[in-house]
């Protein structure tokens, strides 16, 4: 019982449970967006709200290709909604964060080579004056 309790209290099990709950709620939200807003919009454009009654018959077998069309449209709309609502904003945020991380916050002192902040005008370690990075961008050694 002790091992089971430790297993349940590990962080990744809790994170997984939260992810499943949020994923289910997000699925409901996206499905509602597609079903209640995007599908009626498409239906208004093509003047047929439901394709499920489209079919053909071969030797007594009924092929309901309309259901496939409905599923395909639903898949494409859900994919587009997820891409534009989640993937695109998260990609932009990740690019912004990586650009912020790429800009150096520290630089070496030209006299003692200790690390000092980019805005420093005087080295805290050796006390020597340091050229401003704005005045001399080549003073930055990457």
Image (spheres, grey):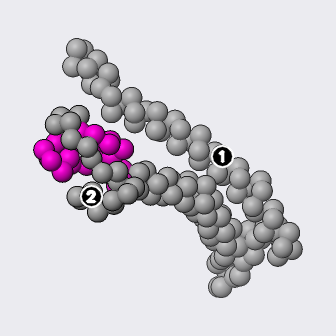
Residue 87 image point, x, y percent: 52, 57
Residue at numbered disc 1: 29
Residue at numbered disc 2: 139
Q: Is residue 33 visible?
A: yes
**Secondary structure at numbered mark 1:** helix
Image quadrant containing the N terminus: top left
Q: Which residues are magenta?
A: 101-123
How far apart are labels 2 and 1 at the CA level?
52 Å
- Does residue 124 lie above or below 26 as drawn? above
Q: Horizontal placement of 37 versus 74: left or right?
A: right
Assess whether mark 1 and mark 2 are in contact (beta carbons under 8 angstroms).
no
Q: Residue at x 82, y 76 (%)?
A: 46
Return the residue found at the far front. 129
Q: Quadrant of residue 117?
A: top left
Return the residue found at the far top. 2
Q: Quadrant of residue 64?
A: bottom right
């Amino acid at each position: 019982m002790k091992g089971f309790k430790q297993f349940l209290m590990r962080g990744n099990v809790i994170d997984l449970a939260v992810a499943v709950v949020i994923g289910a709620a997000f699925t409901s939200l996206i499905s509602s967006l597609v079903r209640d807003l995007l599908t009626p919009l498409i239906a208004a454009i093509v003047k047929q709200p439901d394709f499920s009654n489209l079919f053909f018959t071969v030797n007594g077998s009924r092929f309901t290709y309309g259901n496939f069309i409905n599923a395909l449209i639903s898949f494409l709309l859900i994919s587009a909604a997820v891409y534009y609502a989640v993937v695109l904003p998260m990609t932009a945020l990740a690019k912004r964060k990586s650009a912020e991380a790429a800009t150096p916050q520290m630089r070496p002192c030209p006299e003692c080579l200790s690390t000092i902040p980019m805005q420093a005008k005087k080295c805290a370690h050796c006390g020597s004056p340091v050229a401003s990075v704005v005045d001399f961008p080549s003073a930055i050694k990457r």
